[in-house]
Structure formats: structure tokens, C-alpha cells
């Protein structure tokens, strides 16, 4: 990993350093924007609040929480949540009944006990609803028949327990 040092042409860049990160433009079909609509005008378009100009347009990325497509097209791109330890070019399998490897999607009955899990569906096919925040994980504690016990842990380190029931499908 290369670290770039800033030239001290102005005081704010003194002693600054940046590591090289991959800079890429987002794909147009994977983003959506939200424009500011206020701009200090009322319904008739008359300026009622001074010094309110246009806002900067925010671009949000569409994240695929479901990952339920049976057949992705060749070269189709989707945004998924970052996996700790993943690098660019890693292949992630979104198949049920695949082997246990970091990033693969598996049912909770096939996962070993004591591992950290993120992006958890409560009901099959509803999309991920648990442990989606950065740094939030769940640990698989017990498996009893159709139910499992998960311990949800936030990145602040405060654990709390939740019991999740599984279906046969």
C-alpha cells in the first residue's frame, strides 16, 4: 500500500498523508439522487428566506440486501455490504447450500457455532434486516431444532440477545 505525502504549499496540508484508495465513479444504474426542493421559496416561487441557495445533490447507492436472484447476468454489478478482510476481485457466492467461506450466503443451520455473521434475514426472502450497520455483527450461540440464538453486538461493544426462528425452506 502506497502512502502519499502532501506538499506543504499551504498550512492546512502540512504533515498530511493519504494512503492510495481505489477511486471509481459509481455506475449510473446503481445510484439515485435527491434534490433539495426548498431553496427559500414558497409555493408561488417567491423568495421568502434570503441566503438560501441550491443544495448540493446527494447521490445514494442502491445496496442489494436481498441477493436472491437465481441467475445474475454476465458482468452484472451490484453494491453489497463490505466484508471485513475482502479485497477487490474476491468472488462472493450468493447460493444457499454453498461451502462456508467468508462472504458466502448460507442458512443459519449450516453455519458453525461461534462465528461472526452480518446481513441477517429474519424471514426468508425479506432481505437483510439485522446487523447491517458498519461494525455490527451477530454471533451464533446455539442451534436447537428449527431455532437458533444469536447475540447481536454493536461496534460499541454492547451485546444484547435475540432469538430467531428458522423455517424449513
Image (spheres, helix red, strand yellow):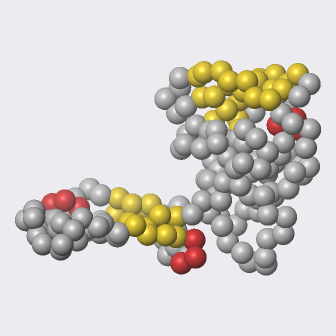
Q: Is residue 30 visible?
A: yes
Q: Is residue 87 visible?
A: no
Q: Farthest front residue?
A: 44
- Horizontal relation, residue 110 to residue 20: left or right: right
Looking at the image, residue 43 lies above or below residue 141: below
Residue 30 percent coordinates (x, y)? 57, 71
Q: In the image shown, does 20 or 163 lie closer to the viewer? A: 163
Looking at the image, residue 130 lies above or below residue 20: above
Question: Image quadrant of residue 6?
Answer: bottom left
Residue at 53% x, 26% y: name it.
157
Residue at 79% x, 71% y: name it.
72
Q: In the image shown, does 168 or 148 lie closer to the viewer? A: 168
Residue 108 percent coordinates (x, y)? 82, 37
Residue at 18% x, 74% y: name it.
45
- Horizontal relation, residue 168 to residue 164: left or right: right
Residue 79 percent coordinates (x, y)? 62, 63
Residue 156 percent coordinates (x, y)? 49, 29
- Horizontal relation, residue 15 to residue 64: left or right: left
Amino acid at each position: 500500500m502506497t502512502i502519499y505525502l502532501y506538499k506543504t504549499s499551504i498550512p492546512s496540508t502540512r504533515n498530511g498523508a493519504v494512503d492510495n484508495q481505489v477511486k471509481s465513479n459509481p455506475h449510473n444504474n446503481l445510484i439515485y439522487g435527491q434534490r433539495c426542493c426548498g431553496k427559500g421559496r414558497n409555493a408561488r416561487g417567491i423568495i421568502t428566506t434570503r441566503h438560501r441557495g441550491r443544495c448540493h445533490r446527494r447521490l445514494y447507492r442502491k445496496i442489494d440486501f436481498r441477493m436472491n436472484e437465481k441467475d445474475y447476468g454476465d458482468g452484472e454489478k451490484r453494491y453489497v455490504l463490505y466484508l471485513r478482510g475482502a479485497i477487490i476481485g474476491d468472488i462472493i457466492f450468493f447460493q444457499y447450500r454453498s461451502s462456508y467461506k467468508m462472504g458466502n450466503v448460507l442458512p443459519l443451520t449450516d453455519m458453525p457455532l461461534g462465528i461472526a455473521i452480518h446481513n441477517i434475514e429474519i424471514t426468508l426472502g425479506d432481505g437483510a434486516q439485522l446487523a447491517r450497520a458498519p461494525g455490527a455483527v451477530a454471533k451464533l450461540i446455539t442451534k436447537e431444532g428449527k431455532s437458533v440464538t444469536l447475540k447481536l453486538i454493536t461496534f460499541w461493544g454492547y451485546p444484547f440477545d435475540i432469538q430467531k426462528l428458522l423455517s424449513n425452506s
